[in-house]
Image: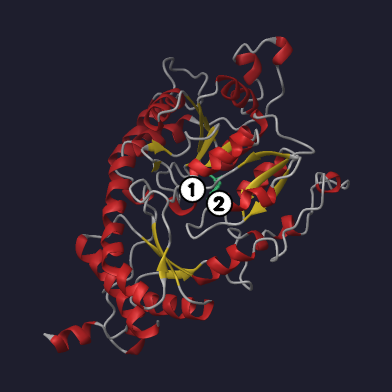
Amino acid sequence: MESRRSDILKPALEGGAPAMPAPCPPMYPGGNLIDAREERAVIDTLRQKRLFRYYGPTPGPSKVDELEQRFAQKMGARRALAVTSGTAALICAVQALGIGPGDEVIIPAYTWIATAAAVLAAGAIPVVAEVDASLTLDPDDLPNRLSDYTRAIIPVHMRGVPCRMAEIMAFARAHDLKVIEDTAQADGATYRGQRLGTLGDAGCYSLQFNKIITSGEGGMLVTDDEQLWQRALMYHDVIGGLRNEIPAQDVLWGINFRMPELLAAVALAQLDKLDPLLETMRARKAILRTALRSLAEQKGLYLQEIPDPEGEAAVAFILFATGPDQARRLSRAISAEHVEAYTLYDPNEVDYHVYTHWIPIVAQRAWNPANLPWAAAPRPVDYSPEACPHTLDLLSRAVHIDVNPLYTGAEIEAVAEAIEKALHYYA
Ligand SMILES: Cc1ncc(COP(=O)(O)O)c(C=O)c1O
Protein backbone atom coordinates (compact mmCIF):
# COMPACT_ATOMS: atom_id res chain seq x y z
CA MET A 1 0.00 0.00 0.00
CA GLU A 2 2.81 2.35 1.00
CA SER A 3 4.72 1.76 -2.26
CA ARG A 4 1.55 2.23 -4.37
CA ARG A 5 1.07 5.64 -2.74
CA SER A 6 4.59 6.78 -3.53
CA ASP A 7 4.15 5.54 -7.10
CA ILE A 8 0.95 7.58 -7.41
CA LEU A 9 2.83 10.61 -6.16
CA LYS A 10 5.62 10.40 -8.75
CA PRO A 11 5.11 13.51 -10.90
CA ALA A 12 4.53 13.22 -14.64
CA LEU A 13 7.56 15.49 -15.09
CA GLU A 14 9.68 12.76 -13.44
CA GLY A 15 8.20 9.99 -15.61
CA GLY A 16 5.20 9.09 -13.41
CA ALA A 17 1.72 8.57 -14.83
CA PRO A 18 -0.22 11.86 -15.12
CA ALA A 19 -2.83 12.22 -12.37
CA MET A 20 -5.43 12.93 -15.05
CA PRO A 21 -5.42 10.36 -17.87
CA ALA A 22 -6.28 12.94 -20.56
CA PRO A 23 -6.19 16.74 -20.81
CA CYS A 24 -9.18 18.39 -19.16
CA PRO A 25 -11.99 19.92 -21.19
CA PRO A 26 -11.71 23.67 -21.81
CA MET A 27 -13.18 25.91 -19.11
CA TYR A 28 -16.40 27.33 -20.58
CA PRO A 29 -18.83 26.80 -17.69
CA GLY A 30 -22.10 27.79 -19.36
CA GLY A 31 -20.83 27.31 -22.91
CA ASN A 32 -20.13 23.63 -22.34
CA LEU A 33 -23.71 23.15 -21.13
CA ILE A 34 -25.36 24.42 -24.31
CA ASP A 35 -27.94 21.81 -25.26
CA ALA A 36 -31.42 21.36 -26.70
CA ARG A 37 -32.80 24.17 -24.53
CA GLU A 38 -30.67 26.86 -26.20
CA GLU A 39 -31.28 25.24 -29.61
CA ARG A 40 -35.04 25.35 -29.09
CA ALA A 41 -34.92 28.94 -27.87
CA VAL A 42 -32.99 30.06 -30.97
CA ILE A 43 -35.19 28.12 -33.41
CA ASP A 44 -38.37 29.44 -31.80
CA THR A 45 -37.09 33.00 -32.04
CA LEU A 46 -36.12 32.54 -35.69
CA ARG A 47 -39.47 30.97 -36.54
CA GLN A 48 -41.25 33.95 -35.06
CA LYS A 49 -39.02 36.22 -37.20
CA ARG A 50 -38.83 38.52 -34.18
CA LEU A 51 -35.14 39.37 -34.08
CA PHE A 52 -35.37 42.93 -32.79
CA ARG A 53 -36.41 43.90 -29.33
CA TYR A 54 -38.80 46.66 -30.20
CA TYR A 55 -40.70 45.32 -33.24
CA GLY A 56 -41.06 42.61 -35.88
CA PRO A 57 -43.72 40.75 -37.86
CA THR A 58 -44.79 38.79 -34.78
CA PRO A 59 -46.13 41.00 -32.03
CA GLY A 60 -45.88 40.05 -28.39
CA PRO A 61 -43.40 40.22 -25.58
CA SER A 62 -39.74 40.51 -26.43
CA LYS A 63 -37.10 38.03 -25.23
CA VAL A 64 -34.91 40.96 -24.15
CA ASP A 65 -37.71 42.26 -21.92
CA GLU A 66 -38.17 38.82 -20.43
CA LEU A 67 -34.43 38.48 -19.84
CA GLU A 68 -34.29 41.85 -18.08
CA GLN A 69 -37.16 40.92 -15.82
CA ARG A 70 -35.83 37.48 -14.97
CA PHE A 71 -32.26 38.69 -14.53
CA ALA A 72 -33.33 41.49 -12.16
CA GLN A 73 -35.43 39.00 -10.21
CA LYS A 74 -32.61 36.42 -10.02
CA MET A 75 -30.08 39.00 -8.81
CA GLY A 76 -32.50 40.74 -6.47
CA ALA A 77 -32.32 44.12 -8.20
CA ARG A 78 -35.17 46.47 -9.05
CA ARG A 79 -34.06 47.08 -12.65
CA ALA A 80 -31.94 45.38 -15.30
CA LEU A 81 -30.81 46.54 -18.71
CA ALA A 82 -29.63 44.08 -21.37
CA VAL A 83 -26.78 45.27 -23.60
CA THR A 84 -24.31 43.84 -26.11
CA SER A 85 -21.35 43.22 -23.78
CA GLY A 86 -19.99 43.59 -20.28
CA THR A 87 -17.92 46.52 -21.55
CA ALA A 88 -21.10 48.16 -22.85
CA ALA A 89 -22.74 47.66 -19.45
CA LEU A 90 -19.78 49.36 -17.74
CA ILE A 91 -19.83 52.27 -20.22
CA CYS A 92 -23.58 52.73 -19.65
CA ALA A 93 -23.06 52.74 -15.87
CA VAL A 94 -20.23 55.28 -16.01
CA GLN A 95 -22.21 57.54 -18.36
CA ALA A 96 -25.43 57.15 -16.39
CA LEU A 97 -23.63 58.33 -13.26
CA GLY A 98 -22.56 61.47 -15.10
CA ILE A 99 -18.85 60.69 -14.80
CA GLY A 100 -16.73 62.42 -17.44
CA PRO A 101 -13.86 64.81 -18.21
CA GLY A 102 -11.98 65.97 -15.13
CA ASP A 103 -13.08 62.97 -13.08
CA GLU A 104 -11.11 60.01 -11.75
CA VAL A 105 -12.38 56.50 -11.10
CA ILE A 106 -10.50 54.03 -8.91
CA ILE A 107 -10.17 50.55 -10.39
CA PRO A 108 -8.06 47.55 -9.33
CA ALA A 109 -4.64 46.97 -10.90
CA TYR A 110 -5.73 43.42 -11.73
CA THR A 111 -8.76 43.43 -14.03
CA TRP A 112 -9.53 43.00 -17.71
CA ILE A 113 -8.58 46.19 -19.59
CA ALA A 114 -12.29 46.74 -20.37
CA THR A 115 -12.80 48.17 -16.87
CA ALA A 116 -10.26 50.91 -17.61
CA ALA A 117 -11.49 51.40 -21.18
CA ALA A 118 -15.05 52.03 -19.97
CA VAL A 119 -13.80 54.88 -17.77
CA LEU A 120 -11.75 56.34 -20.63
CA ALA A 121 -14.70 56.05 -23.02
CA ALA A 122 -16.50 58.59 -20.84
CA GLY A 123 -13.48 60.91 -20.87
CA ALA A 124 -12.53 60.16 -17.26
CA ILE A 125 -9.21 58.85 -15.91
CA PRO A 126 -8.81 55.35 -14.42
CA VAL A 127 -6.61 55.33 -11.31
CA VAL A 128 -5.22 51.92 -10.39
CA ALA A 129 -5.22 50.60 -6.82
CA GLU A 130 -3.63 47.51 -5.27
CA VAL A 131 -5.37 44.17 -4.89
CA ASP A 132 -4.96 42.11 -1.71
CA ALA A 133 -4.50 38.35 -1.26
CA SER A 134 -8.03 37.84 -2.60
CA LEU A 135 -6.74 39.31 -5.89
CA THR A 136 -9.56 41.85 -5.68
CA LEU A 137 -9.47 45.57 -4.87
CA ASP A 138 -7.76 46.20 -1.51
CA PRO A 139 -9.95 48.61 0.50
CA ASP A 140 -6.93 49.50 2.63
CA ASP A 141 -5.30 51.05 -0.44
CA LEU A 142 -8.25 53.28 -1.32
CA PRO A 143 -7.14 56.25 0.85
CA ASN A 144 -3.85 56.30 -1.09
CA ARG A 145 -5.67 56.64 -4.42
CA LEU A 146 -8.33 59.13 -3.41
CA SER A 147 -8.10 62.69 -4.75
CA ASP A 148 -10.34 65.72 -5.08
CA TYR A 149 -11.28 64.37 -8.52
CA THR A 150 -12.36 60.87 -7.50
CA ARG A 151 -16.00 60.26 -8.39
CA ALA A 152 -16.40 56.50 -8.26
CA ILE A 153 -14.85 53.13 -7.47
CA ILE A 154 -15.18 50.05 -9.65
CA PRO A 155 -14.50 46.97 -7.53
CA VAL A 156 -14.02 43.91 -9.76
CA HIS A 157 -15.04 40.47 -8.51
CA MET A 158 -12.14 38.82 -10.31
CA ARG A 159 -12.24 35.10 -10.99
CA GLY A 160 -15.59 34.86 -9.21
CA VAL A 161 -14.30 36.14 -5.87
CA PRO A 162 -16.38 38.74 -4.03
CA CYS A 163 -14.47 41.89 -3.12
CA ARG A 164 -14.43 43.08 0.51
CA MET A 165 -17.61 44.98 -0.23
CA ALA A 166 -18.48 46.07 3.32
CA GLU A 167 -15.24 48.03 3.59
CA ILE A 168 -15.39 49.32 0.01
CA MET A 169 -18.98 50.56 0.45
CA ALA A 170 -18.15 52.18 3.81
CA PHE A 171 -15.23 54.04 2.22
CA ALA A 172 -17.30 55.07 -0.79
CA ARG A 173 -20.16 56.39 1.31
CA ALA A 174 -17.79 58.26 3.63
CA HIS A 175 -16.29 60.05 0.62
CA ASP A 176 -19.46 60.49 -1.41
CA LEU A 177 -18.29 58.18 -4.21
CA LYS A 178 -20.42 56.01 -6.48
CA VAL A 179 -19.72 52.28 -6.75
CA ILE A 180 -20.05 50.27 -9.96
CA GLU A 181 -19.46 46.56 -9.38
CA ASP A 182 -17.71 44.85 -12.28
CA THR A 183 -19.29 41.43 -11.96
CA ALA A 184 -18.24 40.24 -15.44
CA GLN A 185 -16.43 37.21 -14.01
CA ALA A 186 -18.80 36.46 -11.15
CA ASP A 187 -22.34 36.15 -12.56
CA GLY A 188 -24.59 34.89 -9.74
CA ALA A 189 -22.00 34.81 -6.94
CA THR A 190 -22.91 36.36 -3.58
CA TYR A 191 -21.42 38.39 -0.72
CA ARG A 192 -22.98 37.86 2.72
CA GLY A 193 -26.03 36.33 1.03
CA GLN A 194 -26.57 39.13 -1.50
CA ARG A 195 -25.89 38.66 -5.22
CA LEU A 196 -22.82 40.50 -6.46
CA GLY A 197 -23.74 43.47 -8.59
CA THR A 198 -26.50 44.56 -6.21
CA LEU A 199 -24.35 45.97 -3.39
CA GLY A 200 -23.13 49.09 -5.17
CA ASP A 201 -25.01 51.72 -7.18
CA ALA A 202 -24.86 49.57 -10.33
CA GLY A 203 -23.66 46.07 -11.23
CA CYS A 204 -22.32 45.07 -14.64
CA TYR A 205 -22.22 41.48 -15.91
CA SER A 206 -20.80 39.83 -19.00
CA LEU A 207 -22.31 37.01 -21.06
CA GLN A 208 -19.23 36.67 -23.28
CA PHE A 209 -18.26 33.10 -24.10
CA ASN A 210 -15.80 32.30 -21.34
CA LYS A 211 -17.95 33.76 -18.58
CA ILE A 212 -20.03 31.69 -16.15
CA ILE A 213 -23.14 31.82 -18.31
CA THR A 214 -23.04 32.96 -21.88
CA SER A 215 -24.78 34.02 -25.04
CA GLY A 216 -21.45 34.30 -26.90
CA GLU A 217 -21.42 38.06 -26.33
CA GLY A 218 -23.76 40.12 -24.19
CA GLY A 219 -23.97 42.07 -20.96
CA MET A 220 -26.36 43.14 -18.22
CA LEU A 221 -26.55 46.16 -15.96
CA VAL A 222 -28.58 46.07 -12.75
CA THR A 223 -29.49 48.83 -10.33
CA ASP A 224 -32.05 49.83 -7.72
CA ASP A 225 -31.65 53.47 -8.69
CA GLU A 226 -34.51 54.48 -10.99
CA GLN A 227 -32.74 57.55 -12.35
CA LEU A 228 -29.53 55.65 -13.06
CA TRP A 229 -31.55 53.00 -14.92
CA GLN A 230 -33.41 55.62 -16.96
CA ARG A 231 -30.15 57.27 -17.97
CA ALA A 232 -28.51 53.95 -18.86
CA LEU A 233 -31.59 53.05 -20.91
CA MET A 234 -31.34 56.35 -22.73
CA TYR A 235 -27.61 55.95 -23.39
CA HIS A 236 -27.77 52.35 -24.68
CA ASP A 237 -30.21 53.24 -27.51
CA VAL A 238 -29.87 56.13 -29.99
CA ILE A 239 -33.54 56.93 -29.58
CA GLY A 240 -33.83 55.60 -26.04
CA GLY A 241 -34.87 59.04 -24.81
CA LEU A 242 -37.77 59.29 -27.25
CA ARG A 243 -38.76 55.66 -26.95
CA ASN A 244 -39.02 55.92 -23.20
CA GLU A 245 -40.66 59.32 -23.17
CA ILE A 246 -37.90 60.99 -21.20
CA PRO A 247 -39.03 64.60 -20.61
CA ALA A 248 -37.57 66.98 -23.22
CA GLN A 249 -35.52 68.88 -20.66
CA ASP A 250 -33.78 65.64 -19.58
CA VAL A 251 -33.20 64.00 -22.99
CA LEU A 252 -29.60 63.21 -23.93
CA TRP A 253 -28.14 61.49 -27.00
CA GLY A 254 -27.44 57.79 -26.84
CA ILE A 255 -25.53 55.24 -28.89
CA ASN A 256 -26.42 51.65 -29.75
CA PHE A 257 -25.73 48.82 -27.32
CA ARG A 258 -29.16 47.18 -27.79
CA MET A 259 -29.22 43.43 -27.20
CA PRO A 260 -30.62 41.34 -30.08
CA GLU A 261 -33.45 38.88 -29.42
CA LEU A 262 -31.36 35.85 -30.37
CA LEU A 263 -28.83 36.63 -27.64
CA ALA A 264 -31.61 37.09 -25.10
CA ALA A 265 -33.15 33.75 -26.09
CA VAL A 266 -29.85 31.98 -25.40
CA ALA A 267 -29.21 33.99 -22.22
CA LEU A 268 -32.62 33.01 -20.83
CA ALA A 269 -31.83 29.32 -21.27
CA GLN A 270 -28.44 29.87 -19.63
CA LEU A 271 -29.89 31.78 -16.70
CA ASP A 272 -31.77 28.63 -15.64
CA LYS A 273 -28.44 26.82 -15.46
CA LEU A 274 -26.65 29.44 -13.35
CA ASP A 275 -27.38 28.29 -9.80
CA PRO A 276 -26.76 24.56 -10.41
CA LEU A 277 -23.48 25.51 -12.12
CA LEU A 278 -22.38 27.59 -9.14
CA GLU A 279 -23.30 24.78 -6.77
CA THR A 280 -21.22 22.28 -8.74
CA MET A 281 -18.16 24.51 -8.88
CA ARG A 282 -18.40 25.34 -5.16
CA ALA A 283 -18.62 21.65 -4.24
CA ARG A 284 -15.65 20.80 -6.48
CA LYS A 285 -13.55 23.61 -5.08
CA ALA A 286 -14.33 22.60 -1.49
CA ILE A 287 -12.72 19.23 -2.24
CA LEU A 288 -9.53 20.93 -3.43
CA ARG A 289 -9.44 23.28 -0.44
CA THR A 290 -9.86 20.46 2.06
CA ALA A 291 -7.31 18.25 0.33
CA LEU A 292 -4.61 20.87 -0.13
CA ARG A 293 -4.74 23.64 2.42
CA SER A 294 -2.59 22.09 5.12
CA LEU A 295 -0.03 20.64 2.68
CA ALA A 296 0.33 24.04 1.00
CA GLU A 297 0.82 25.74 4.36
CA GLN A 298 3.37 23.13 5.50
CA LYS A 299 5.35 24.05 2.38
CA GLY A 300 5.14 27.78 3.08
CA LEU A 301 2.54 28.50 0.40
CA TYR A 302 -0.92 29.86 1.04
CA LEU A 303 -4.30 29.80 -0.64
CA GLN A 304 -6.03 32.84 -2.12
CA GLU A 305 -8.05 34.58 0.59
CA ILE A 306 -11.77 34.53 -0.16
CA PRO A 307 -13.79 37.30 1.56
CA ASP A 308 -16.93 35.10 1.41
CA PRO A 309 -16.08 31.44 0.69
CA GLU A 310 -19.75 30.35 0.59
CA GLY A 311 -20.62 33.06 -1.90
CA GLU A 312 -17.77 32.93 -4.36
CA ALA A 313 -18.40 31.49 -7.82
CA ALA A 314 -15.49 29.06 -7.27
CA VAL A 315 -14.29 29.13 -10.88
CA ALA A 316 -10.63 28.88 -9.86
CA PHE A 317 -8.32 27.47 -7.23
CA ILE A 318 -5.39 29.81 -6.68
CA LEU A 319 -2.38 29.39 -4.43
CA PHE A 320 0.54 31.70 -3.82
CA ALA A 321 4.04 30.27 -4.14
CA THR A 322 6.98 31.72 -2.24
CA GLY A 323 8.36 33.32 -5.42
CA PRO A 324 7.83 33.57 -9.20
CA ASP A 325 10.31 30.76 -10.01
CA GLN A 326 8.54 28.35 -7.69
CA ALA A 327 5.17 29.42 -9.13
CA ARG A 328 6.36 28.69 -12.68
CA ARG A 329 7.84 25.34 -11.58
CA LEU A 330 4.59 24.32 -9.90
CA SER A 331 2.50 25.42 -12.91
CA ARG A 332 4.67 23.37 -15.26
CA ALA A 333 4.48 20.32 -13.00
CA ILE A 334 0.70 20.53 -12.58
CA SER A 335 0.15 21.07 -16.31
CA ALA A 336 2.24 17.96 -17.01
CA GLU A 337 -0.38 16.06 -14.99
CA HIS A 338 -2.95 17.13 -17.64
CA VAL A 339 -4.39 19.75 -15.30
CA GLU A 340 -3.89 23.16 -16.85
CA ALA A 341 -2.17 25.56 -14.46
CA TYR A 342 -0.65 28.96 -15.08
CA THR A 343 0.83 31.95 -13.31
CA LEU A 344 -0.92 35.31 -13.51
CA TYR A 345 1.87 37.75 -14.29
CA ASP A 346 5.01 37.61 -16.34
CA PRO A 347 6.55 41.01 -17.13
CA ASN A 348 7.60 39.67 -20.54
CA GLU A 349 4.27 38.26 -21.64
CA VAL A 350 1.54 40.72 -22.54
CA ASP A 351 -1.69 39.99 -20.69
CA TYR A 352 -4.45 42.60 -20.65
CA HIS A 353 -5.54 41.46 -17.18
CA VAL A 354 -2.59 43.24 -15.56
CA TYR A 355 -2.38 47.03 -15.64
CA THR A 356 1.31 47.20 -16.59
CA HIS A 357 0.39 45.38 -19.82
CA TRP A 358 -2.37 47.78 -20.86
CA ILE A 359 -0.09 49.09 -23.60
CA PRO A 360 -2.16 52.06 -24.94
CA ILE A 361 -3.18 53.08 -21.42
CA VAL A 362 0.33 52.90 -19.98
CA ALA A 363 1.44 55.04 -22.93
CA GLN A 364 -1.51 57.38 -22.26
CA ARG A 365 -2.38 57.30 -25.94
CA ALA A 366 -5.74 58.59 -27.18
CA TRP A 367 -7.83 58.34 -30.34
CA ASN A 368 -7.70 62.08 -30.96
CA PRO A 369 -4.80 64.40 -31.81
CA ALA A 370 -5.48 66.52 -28.72
CA ASN A 371 -4.73 63.37 -26.71
CA LEU A 372 -7.78 63.71 -24.52
CA PRO A 373 -8.57 62.80 -21.82
CA TRP A 374 -4.90 62.34 -20.92
CA ALA A 375 -3.85 65.85 -21.88
CA ALA A 376 -6.54 67.29 -19.59
CA ALA A 377 -6.02 64.85 -16.70
CA PRO A 378 -6.54 66.78 -13.46
CA ARG A 379 -3.21 65.48 -12.08
CA PRO A 380 -0.42 63.14 -13.25
CA VAL A 381 -1.43 59.49 -13.32
CA ASP A 382 0.93 56.56 -12.76
CA TYR A 383 0.72 53.16 -14.47
CA SER A 384 4.35 52.21 -13.89
CA PRO A 385 5.26 48.99 -12.07
CA GLU A 386 5.92 51.17 -9.01
CA ALA A 387 2.24 52.21 -8.89
CA CYS A 388 1.05 48.81 -7.58
CA PRO A 389 4.07 46.66 -6.65
CA HIS A 390 2.15 44.51 -4.18
CA THR A 391 -0.31 43.46 -6.91
CA LEU A 392 2.52 42.51 -9.28
CA ASP A 393 4.24 40.51 -6.55
CA LEU A 394 1.05 38.59 -5.71
CA LEU A 395 0.20 37.89 -9.36
CA SER A 396 3.73 36.73 -10.16
CA ARG A 397 3.53 34.18 -7.32
CA ALA A 398 0.00 32.99 -8.09
CA VAL A 399 -0.64 29.52 -9.49
CA HIS A 400 -4.08 29.38 -11.12
CA ILE A 401 -6.05 26.20 -11.71
CA ASP A 402 -9.56 26.15 -13.22
CA VAL A 403 -12.35 24.49 -11.25
CA ASN A 404 -14.14 23.04 -14.24
CA PRO A 405 -17.77 22.12 -13.53
CA LEU A 406 -17.42 19.24 -16.00
CA TYR A 407 -15.03 17.42 -13.65
CA THR A 408 -16.54 14.30 -12.16
CA GLY A 409 -15.94 13.48 -8.49
CA ALA A 410 -13.07 11.18 -9.50
CA GLU A 411 -11.57 13.83 -11.77
CA ILE A 412 -11.54 16.52 -9.10
CA GLU A 413 -9.73 14.02 -6.84
CA ALA A 414 -7.22 13.64 -9.68
CA VAL A 415 -6.81 17.42 -9.84
CA ALA A 416 -6.08 17.41 -6.10
CA GLU A 417 -3.57 14.63 -6.63
CA ALA A 418 -1.86 16.57 -9.44
CA ILE A 419 -1.40 19.59 -7.18
CA GLU A 420 -0.35 17.40 -4.25
CA LYS A 421 2.38 15.75 -6.33
CA ALA A 422 3.67 19.11 -7.49
CA LEU A 423 3.75 20.48 -3.95
CA HIS A 424 5.56 17.38 -2.64
CA TYR A 425 8.27 17.48 -5.31
CA TYR A 426 8.69 21.11 -6.26
CA ALA A 427 7.73 23.26 -3.27
C1 LIG B 1 -13.37 41.83 -15.27
C2 LIG B 1 -14.00 42.08 -16.61
N1 LIG B 1 -14.61 43.24 -16.84
C3 LIG B 1 -15.22 43.49 -18.01
C4 LIG B 1 -15.21 42.58 -19.03
C5 LIG B 1 -15.85 42.92 -20.32
O1 LIG B 1 -16.86 42.05 -20.71
P1 LIG B 1 -17.16 41.82 -22.25
O2 LIG B 1 -16.08 40.97 -22.80
O3 LIG B 1 -18.49 41.14 -22.25
O4 LIG B 1 -17.21 43.16 -22.89
C6 LIG B 1 -14.58 41.35 -18.85
C7 LIG B 1 -14.60 40.34 -19.91
O5 LIG B 1 -13.68 39.77 -20.33
C8 LIG B 1 -13.94 41.09 -17.60
O6 LIG B 1 -13.32 39.94 -17.37
Write down the quadrant of residue 191 in the picture.
top left
Q: Amino acid at mark 2?
A: Leu
303 w.r.t. 183: above or below: below
Q: Which residue is mark 1?
A: 163
277 or 294: which is nearer to us? 294
282 w.r.t. 195: above or below: below
Of callouts 2 and 1, the N-terminal one: 2
Residue shown at the point (60%, 27%) measured from the top left? 232
Does the residue at mark 2 contact the one at mark 1 (Cβ under 8 Å)?
yes
Q: Which residue is mark 2?
A: 137
Q: Badge 2: how crowded within 10 Å, few (<14), some, or many (20+)?
A: many
Residue shown at the point (79%, 54%) measured from the top left? 365
Tell me the quadrant of the picture where the N terminus can be found: bottom left
Tell me the quadrant of the picture where the C terminus can be found: bottom left
Q: Badge 1: how crowded within 10 Å, few (<14), some, or many (20+)?
A: many
21 or 56: which is nearer to us? 21
Residue shown at the point (27%, 50%) measured from the top left? 280
**Residue 179: x %, y % from top left:** 58, 37
Residue at the far left in the pictured view = 1
Count of numbered badges drawn on the protein: 2
**Residue 192: x %, y % from top left:** 38, 40
> Callout 2: helix, strand or loop?
loop
| Residue 85 appears in the rendering | no
| Residue 265 appears in the rendering | yes
298 w.r.t. 166: above or below: below
Q: Amino acid at mark 1?
A: Cys
> Callout 1: helix, strand or loop?
loop
369 or 125: which is nearer to us? 125
* The residue carrying mark 1 has its beta carbon less than 8 Å from ligand 1: no
